[in-house]
Amino acid sequence: MVTLKSHVCGRWHEAGASFATLVNPSTEAEVARASSEGIDYDAVLAYARERGGPALRELTFAARGELLKAISKLLREHREELLALSRLNSGTTESDGAFDIDGATGTLHYYAGLGKSLGDARMLTEGDVIPLSKTDAFAAQHVLVPRQGVAVHINAFNFPAWGFAEKLACAILGGMPVITKPATATALVTARCVELIVEAGILPEGALQFICGSTGDLLDRLGAQDVVAFTGSADTARTLRAKPSLIAACTRFNVEADSLNAAVLGDGIVDGPVFDLFIRDVVREIRQKAGQKCTAVRRIVVPAAVIDRVKEALGGKLDRTVVGDPAEAGVTMGPLATAQQLDDALRGIAELKRSARIVYGTGERVDGVGSPAGKGYFIAPTLLRADDAFAATAVHEREVFGPVATLLPYDGSAVQAAEIVALANGTLVTSLYSDDAAWIASFVQNGGSSTGRVYVGSSESAPEAPGSGVVFPAALHGGPGRAGGGEELGGLLGVRLYMQRVAVEGSRALLAGLAAGAQAGLRQHAQ
Ligand code: NAP
């Protein structure tokens, strides 16, 4: 069996004990083992702070962008190999694996371009010079400079390539060295990405270290200049952000967590391009990555008058799902990633059944096509329905991380749709399907504060609408409340996490000199 190694202090670290086993979720065959036992985290932090940080800060934005461009190209060249590892360790179909891996290379490529556009600067000005006196003698300019610490990245199991790459891109462009940790259960893809980057010698020494397994006491050793970017469950986020050492040091902590995303069908839509797009998108969101996406649709909010029609249309498309081992031809949906995920999804469905009833599928484990009977963590698409959206408490509280969603009726008004969406206490994305600009504006006005992103599917956008699950690097990813309250991507918004804002006060002439050496990045790109 393959033993995965960490890469710390410029060398590979192989643990001697405390191994976790990684499996193929379609067959339950063991594929690798991982442990980080024996890593000296003081040395890891010193290596990043003393070698990686200064080396990155020395580079201009354009030069850092070049590093990202090289990584993007390298991973693209190994796309097929990474897809195979994704299938082996995450049970992804070709398109589900590509969603992760192409998302990673695309995001790196985007940030490479952003670096190029920022040119030879090493800091950013934010906004215009602000007058502070009647003359030009005294004014202020907000400036962003790299934090002189370490960026610790902790990622969820479901995006081992994209999660790794999107955080890496923002931190490297911001000038901070990275210590990255994938979820252990699906670490194979990230481990290979890091191995490729190390072998190619793209990054300066100390700019990227890789922990494969537990982070030990790393988080207890962080300080005021460091940043933690966490993606995972709301429960783990709560535990980690409450660490006394992080609170005492005021370590910056960004969280991307769970989300009970909603798709809302506008009033009076019973057929036509918007209805078809709604059905197509919701089916994709249920099936893609077997529903293991933080952005997947969990709540399907539709006018009460069309709920039966919507259920029939969704069922008709879901009928075509072939659940099984993605290595088998014809399979369109793979398994959940681990035994624990399957167990959690089954328990979650039982909880949803307290508020809703199953109207499609069984909500039980099934055997998968091409997999040995009784083996593999398969669950078929399942739809539930509640008749009173406001009373369906579990539907707004329990994230079932699988191909499972619940139909909820509403009265067709944007105000009531916003109230229902808000019951989940903060989501990453809400998708609206309507051509009615006033209805959409009313939803954004009333419900925008409870979600990080609003995706609008309309007749006009239908030909190019990618589905609400696609996270573009140029647009904000993150959401309030339960979704973590964090902000990632969004162009320079995501880079800002790794930089410190300083208000520099002085004469306008002096500030003009300062601004000339910086880049007015945030005014141009992300205000
Ligand atoms: P998880 O169990 O919370 O684990 C997330 C990460 O935290 C893993 O790398 C895990 O490492 C690590 N971790 C757990 N306990 C830790 C500790 N005490 N100290 C340091 N690290 C610790 O979540 P998951 O099951 O991997 O991911 C699924 C969840 O992520 C879902 O709820 C999903 O909604 C959410 N998610 C959110 C986003 C987003 O962008 N908002 C994206 C993807 C997923 P080990 O694996 O080694 O335990």
Image (tube, rainbow, N blue to C red):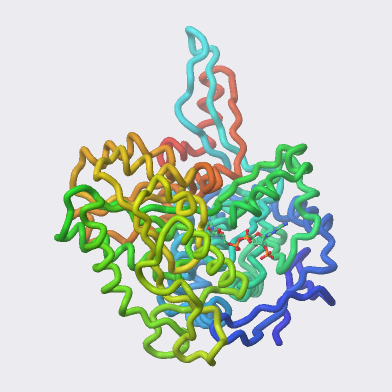
Residue 314 x %, y %: 29, 68
The residue positioned 31% from the left and 40% from the top of the image is 416
Residue 175 x %, y %: 62, 49
Vertical placement of residue 258 versus 34, above or below? above
Q: How many marks?
A: 0
Q: Taking the image as four quarters, which one is ligand 1 found in?
A: bottom right
**Which image quarter is the N terminus in?**
bottom right
The residue positioned 57% from the left and 40% from the top of the image is 123
Q: Nearer the viewer, residue 261 or 153?
A: 261
Left or right of residue 138, residue 332 in this image? left
Vertical placement of residue 312 versus 244, above or below? below
Q: Nearer the viewer, residue 20 or 512?
A: 20
Residue 355 x %, y %: 45, 55
Residue 14 x %, y %: 79, 75
**Which image quarter is the C terminus in?**
top left
The residue positioned 56% from the left and 87% from the top of the image is 374
Query: Which residue is the extreme one toward the top?
Result: 134
Query: Which residue is the extreme one toward the left?
Result: 272
Q: Can the viewer see residue 229?
A: yes
Q: Quadrant of residue 383?
A: bottom left
Q: Can the viewer see residue 113?
A: no
Q: Nearer the viewer, residue 429 or 40?
A: 429
Q: Nearer the viewer, residue 290 or 96?
A: 290
